[in-house]
Amino acid sequence: MTTVTEKTLRIELFAKELGFDGFGVAREVPAQSVAKYKNWLSLGYEGEMSYMCRNVEKRSDLDLVLSEVKSVVCLRTNYLTADKGMEFIHDKEYGDISLYALNEDYHDVLAQRHQKLEKKIKEEFSGCRTKPYVDTGPILEKPLAKNAGLGWIGKHTNLITESVGSYYFLSEILVDAVMEPSEPSLDKCGTCRSCIDICPTQAIVAPYVLDSRKCISYLTIELKGVIPIEFRKAMGNHIYGCDDCQIVCPWNSFAVKTDEESFRAQDGSFQLIELMRLNDEAFRKRFKKSPVKRTKRRGLLRNVAVALGNSGNLSAVGPLIDALSDHEPLIRAHVVWALGELLGKKALPILNKTLTNEEEDIVKNEINLVQQHYS
């Protein structure tokens, strides 16, 4: 008779054949992690990510996600396709996009693998029920992954794996069958605080605590409205996400690149002026299969306008003036700020001439800020 351990091992081997480079099994969400999560919410650190406040009960009790769940298969998928250091901050003509978003949307790529792995699990545990999640469900995936031995939660709140680093996706399959559990990972951050010190917006407010409202990944992706002015200069040329805390993490010196073509950049040129000129159709075409489409055109060009404002590149003035007539108020508002940064007082006659009295409030507010600053 085949044992649970043998069945679990066969599932693990199959997962690695599918391209998952990490596999572990957890039994439950640690009570300590649930308490930390609830405290994080009480501080308002989730910002506009309202989905983090929904289904608090489900995140606390897996049985509410899949009744009689007994095991959580935790999976790790490497997305590192290129070496990356901090030199990009000096290349002001180009925008920086997080490594994970350089090509196809990982949700689509991993969903296909999950389907095959679910089938294998059901073959090994006949009659079992499964429920997959690829960064989409009401579960605390990082504490589960830690319990499954995939790594520990670092001071920047990303999962880190010894001899692997942190450039990977996490995903899960809940199973109502008993599988062989893994040994939890131990924290190996030690006294290092490189991630805390590098953060441009000081979003890591304490070791292991992230105020998302300050995080550049949140500001450029999750935040749908106006970027608070106090963070704009610190954003530099980040236009979608931020890898800074991972780049400086010593454990990522062990990171090995993946051969997965779906994650490899097909067009690595994110020239800011070129992006600023994208119309709706061009945006949809270029980012059709990319995670970047999540921000929509107005979100990306909002970020691009901020990056151009930080660039010191006067060649951007013309394209920015053209963008003052964009149909999206959110874009126009940040273009106003960018022109103020690049031209100073000289921006005032341009703004007065180009913008009308019928402008939306968010645009008027930006004009007032520029006028007050240079009057």
Image: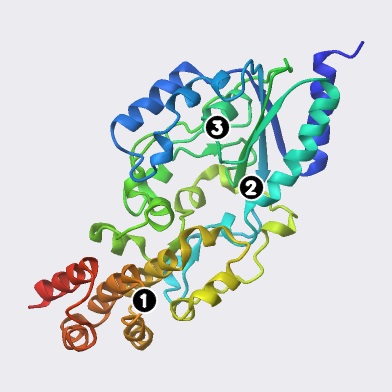
Q: Identify residue for label 2.
A: 255
Residue density around tag 1, few if under 14, some if 14–19, many if 20 or more, within 10 Å: few
Q: Residue at x 81, y 24 (%)?
A: 9
Kind of residue indicated by mark 2: Ala
> Mark 1 and mark 2 in contact (Cβ < 8 Å)?
no
- Labels 3 and 1: the sequence-earlier one: 3
SS for callout 1: loop
- Labels 2 and 1: the sequence-earlier one: 2
The quarter of the picture where the N terminus appears is top right
Q: Is residue 210 left or right of residue 132?
A: left
| Residue 304: percent from left, percent from top | 41, 70
Image quarter for residue 55? top left
Q: Identify residue for label 3.
A: 141
| Residue 243: percent from left, percent from top | 49, 53
Above or below for 312 versus 353? above
The foreground one among 142 and 172 is 172
Above or below for 49 versus 117? below
| Residue 84: percent from left, percent from top | 56, 59
Q: Is residue 164 left or right of residue 343?
A: right
Kind of residue indicated by mark 3: Glu
Residue density around tag 2, few if under 14, some if 14–19, many if 20 or more, within 10 Å: some
Q: Identify residue for label 1.
A: 327
SS for callout 2: loop
Residue at the extreme left of the image, as rendered:
375
- Labels 3 and 2: the sequence-earlier one: 3
Image quarter for residue 70? top right
Q: Mark 3 or 1, which is nearer the eye?
A: 1
Above or below for 372 versus 127? below
